[in-house]
Image (cartoon, rainbow, N blue to C red):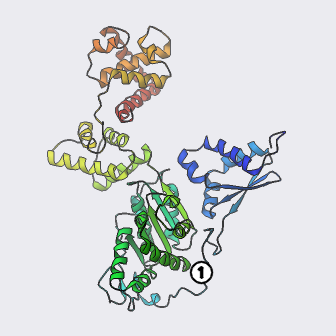
Amino acid sequence: MRFGMVMDYATVWDNCLQTIRKNVPTQSFRTWFEPIKPVRLQDQALTIQVPNKFFYEWLEEHYVSLLKMTIRKELGDHGRLEYQILMSSNGNGNGHGPKAKPGSEEKSNEDHLGPGMIDMGNIKNPFVIPGIKKLKIDPQLNANYTFATYIEGDCNRLARSAGQAIAKNPGGTSFNPLVIFGDVGLGKTHLAHAVGNEVLERFPNKTVLYVSSEKFTNQIIQSIKNNAVNDFVNFYQLVDVLIVDDIQFLANKQKTQEIFFHIFNQLHQNNRQIILTSDRAPKDLDGMEERLISRFKWGLSADLQAPDLETRMAILEAKMNREGVEISQDVTEFICYNIKNNIRELEGVLVSLIAQSSLNRREIDVDLAKMVVKNFVTEINKEITVEFIQKLVAEHFSVAVEKLQGKTRKRQVVIARQLSMYLAKNLTDKSLKAIGETFGGRDHSTVIYSCKTVQDLMETDAIFKDTVVELEKKIRMSLNDK
């Protein structure tokens, strides 16, 4: 512990977080460290509370060295970290929730039915023609939405890992319910379907059902109209894995929420798996009953963030492989630099590119990509200017733009100036004379000499060549950020 200071557990953990924040990506910090709560500090041991066992195991596997370093920094060489795993009364690690009664789940009928079959008895099925017994329930899943086609990145790793754990043991993990939330087009529905498809692959006798909140609401309206609410509720209580998409649309629908509340309780008590998607975190769901929000928090709420460039590239390349098309790296990089916040749009651009290429018999190049992308984002066709090149190169070499235009002969400035001229010649339609004018009134022969110098350096210095390639790429792709 720091000499001369007596710190409480909250202060120690807050100091640790300040160090951790500097050493992990922002998304990872929000996902893995913000939910942790300090509990006590005793004998140089800081106890922290984590939501569940999966959370603890992830920290130990991925961040044990960082945690050890930060704890010893605060508490000394003998400082150590202890965990308190938040457990529920039913032992599932939810922290809340009623305990399932022994023997309360009746399995006898299901044991004698085929894959995906449940004994409907006289219960009406809202998805098909009523009154049919021993019916194979259509899970309403998209077979193309699988884990194999769901690219993992920092933006979705927690949600994807939780989904895979559920698929191996539906209803038997601490992630019940699993609430997947995030902005439009980030893959919430894809992931929810992937879990459902994986469950059916592993457990053919399980009954999986996907339903949008809109369809769920319409079914309730029809059941009320037909005086068949009990049949509706009983049907849903027979499902092993229930996936409800866009739960936020249940807001301000009091009767729908009341019925869903009872279905949720029965499924959860009987260890049936519930998966929900939403465009916001449970705590931010306006117009939702507090008792429902409380239950949504029983399991795991996993947010999906906008994918980084590498993940967007991987998503696009995977889509290209599925479509059986080849596109140059320049084109894919251009697309991924400009479509940043919506995976659906990213895939939409690719489909549009393929269609434009096929219909107009054009090669897929950067010019065609610009034409397509401008329908998805604004200001994509900005002209590359010499001034813009100067600014980016100056930032890269940590020199002032004015020095590129001045007379200083310091090596770093000279290299930056020559490289700026080289890029200006290759990336703009300016004449050599016009380029020279923007560099303090230099003549065209200086520009020619600079370009030749850069070319020679690229042939003899691999690191310098990489720098040139990276800067050229950044200039081409970064315009939409400016």
Q: Is 47 situated left or right of 318 in this image?
A: right
Above or below — where is 65 with respect to 93? above
Q: Residue at x 33, y 12 (%)?
A: 436
**433 versus 235 height, above or below:** above
Residue 421 picture quarter: top left
| Relative height, residue 258 to residue 465 (above, below) | below
The one of 215 and 127 positioned closer to us in this rendering: 215
What is the x, y in percent for residue 358? 17, 48
Instruction: Classify residue 249 as left or right of residue 5.
Output: left
* Three-letter code, disc 1: Ala
Left or right for 324, reference 85: left
Pointer 1 residue: 100
- SS of the residue under disc 1: loop
Residue 352 seen in this snapshot: yes
- Image quarter (top left, top right, bottom left or bottom right) of the C terminus: top left
Q: What's the residue at 33%, 42% (across, down)?
A: 335
Question: Based on the displayed image, in which of its 4 quarters is residue 231 positioned?
Answer: bottom left
- Residue at x 58%, y 48% (from the top left corner): 29
Where is residue 13 drawn, in percent x and y? Answer: 70, 48
Q: Residues within 10 Å of mark 1 (few under 14, many from 20)?
A: some
**Residue most extreme to the left:** 360
Residue in front for this viewpoint, 397 or 210: 210
Query: Where the N terminus falls, by quadrant?
Result: top right
**Percent x, y of residue 430:** 27, 19
| Residue 462 image point, x, y percent | 45, 27
Q: Residue at x 37, y 86 (%)?
A: 228
In the rendered structure, the answer to whether residue 372 lies left or right of residue 314 reads: left
Residue 459 appears in view: no
